[in-house]
Amino acid sequence: MKFYSARQAIHDAYAIHLTSRGFEVNPLAFRAGSQSSKLDNNLLICNAVEAGKVIAAVEKLDEPFRSWAKWAYAPRTEHFMPEQGRFFQWLEQDVTEQLAKSGRDYREATKQRIRDVVAYTVLDYRSYVTNGQHLYPSSLIIKKCRIQKQNWKRDFQMWHAKYWNVCDKILDANTLILLKNLICSNN
């Protein structure tokens, strides 16, 4: 397994983990003497070991970094949905705390729209870092959340910018640095 980035390493490790469930070495292939099947089995074993190292490092991360790594970079499959859901539980709790600390008395409808803006923001961030495209630019968020354009700057733009920075400067940066340090310390 060749690593080009920590993001790709997380994705590939969990993808290999999914495809190698029940993986067993085929002793008949070794007895048959086929050089290519020996190489294929050796490569599969080596990739599974490397994937295990990355997964073990992700599992050592504290929350919310562990949930972020799985949510942002693991394959989007039914198998990972419960683990990836933990990230949104953390996000909901964090937004609730930040709303309480904000000192503003928002109406309940505005609080719900703020939560929606934050959710779209983190979805957009994940899309942007994984494929370089904005899935939910602010104009689309305004439309999807049914926000009046004149209210965007006053009530919502700050939350959009704040959680983009949380994703970029806190969650992503710390997760990738911690993961790199854990993997390098194990080698």
Image (spheres, rainbow, N blue to C red):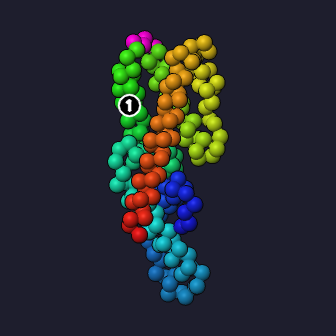
Any part of residue 81 in sight: no
Quarter of the figure with the N terminus? bottom right
Q: Which residues are magenta?
A: 105-109
How many numbered discs, if any?
A: 1
* Residue type indicated by callout 1: Asp
State the residue in front, 13 or 104: 104
Coordinates of residue 14 in the picture (x, y in percent): 47, 56
Question: Is residue 33 rendered to the left or right of residue 23?
Answer: right
State the residue in front, 21 or 11: 11
Q: Which residue is mark 1?
A: 94
Residue at left 41%, top 39%? 87
Res 25 → quadrant:
bottom left
> Badge 1 local density, few (<14 within 10 Å), some, or many (20+)?
few
Q: Is residue 108 magenta?
A: yes
State the residue in front, 92 or 62: 62
Any part of residue 101 in sight: yes
Q: Is residue 173 magenta?
A: no
